[in-house]
Image: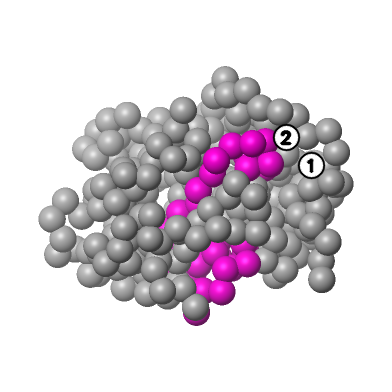
Amino acid sequence: MSKTIAIANQKGGVGKTTTCINLAAYFAAFGKRVLIIDNDPQGNASSGLGIEKHKVKRSVYSLVVGDCTAKEAILPTCVDGLDIIPSNIDLAGAEVELVSFANREHLLKRALAPIKDEYDYIFIDCPPFIGLLTLNALTAADSILIPMQGEYFALEGLSQLMNTIKLTKKILNHSLEIEGVVVTMFSSRTNLVNNVAEEITHFFGKKAFATRIPRSIRLAEAPSFGMPITQFDPTSTGGIAYKNLAEEMLNRNRDPFEPIKNLSALKRKMQ
């Protein structure tokens, strides 16, 4: 089984990169072969996994413009079973540069085709806007995972996002499906957050994941150490939440996995 999942939302600050890094790390911990495509010029998924962006010679940019193959761009991470094709500031100019390319929305899909079957799951971390980079991700993906913050403004952009997905499916990728919607930065103590979370669940029905990701200092701290939460603090509330989300996703995909019996054993000792 090989599945490519784009993690996207045109609104920034909703936890896309946090979700990408930590879901991928847990999938790897469950024994899956996983690859992250850091499709955001900010390169936060790369630095969040300990990659020194300024030293990267082959990146997503190199890949889509044809300067290297996917296999040449892949780097190992600090997590066993988890690789990454990193990003850096070079990707910032791609939105303009790729306009002149033929079939420009299919560049990433074509580039990933030779290595897709080497992984069980490929996660694509998307930038916080709908442009050529995100359209390339949606064209390459089998499904889209949508992180949504539990606040009113999250609902305001919902119709625009759904329209983008609808048009992408109609024109560029007929097989694109919604993997699911996950509520992030959740706090059950706030009535507004509870109300928004319920609205999201009502709108998406079974596509809304039961697992909700709480606000967590440990989740916020982990990227500064270049670690996913699996290694930084898997027993924290955020660590447990992402483990539960990973289990829920794998169960939805009917993909068997070996349960993690000791979360503390995942943690790498910090030097």
* 208 sits to left or right of 88: right
Indicate the position of residue 55 as horizontal and vertical percent values: 49, 78
Tell me the number on the disc at residue 244.
Answer: 2
Look at 23% across and 69% down and name the residue there: 97
Tell me the number on the disc at residue 264.
Answer: none
In this rendering, the count of numbered labels is: 2
Disc 2 is placed on an element classified as helix
Indicate the position of residue 127 as horizontal and vertical percent values: 45, 59
Residue 50 shown in magenta: yes
Disc 1 is placed on an element classified as helix
Find the magenta span and give its range: 26-54
Q: Is residue 201 visible?
A: no
Q: Nearer the viewer, residue 214 or 224?
A: 224
* 62 sits to left or right of 79: left
CA gap, disc 1 and disc 2? 6 Å
Q: Amino acid at mark 2?
A: Asn
Residue 68 shown in magenta: no
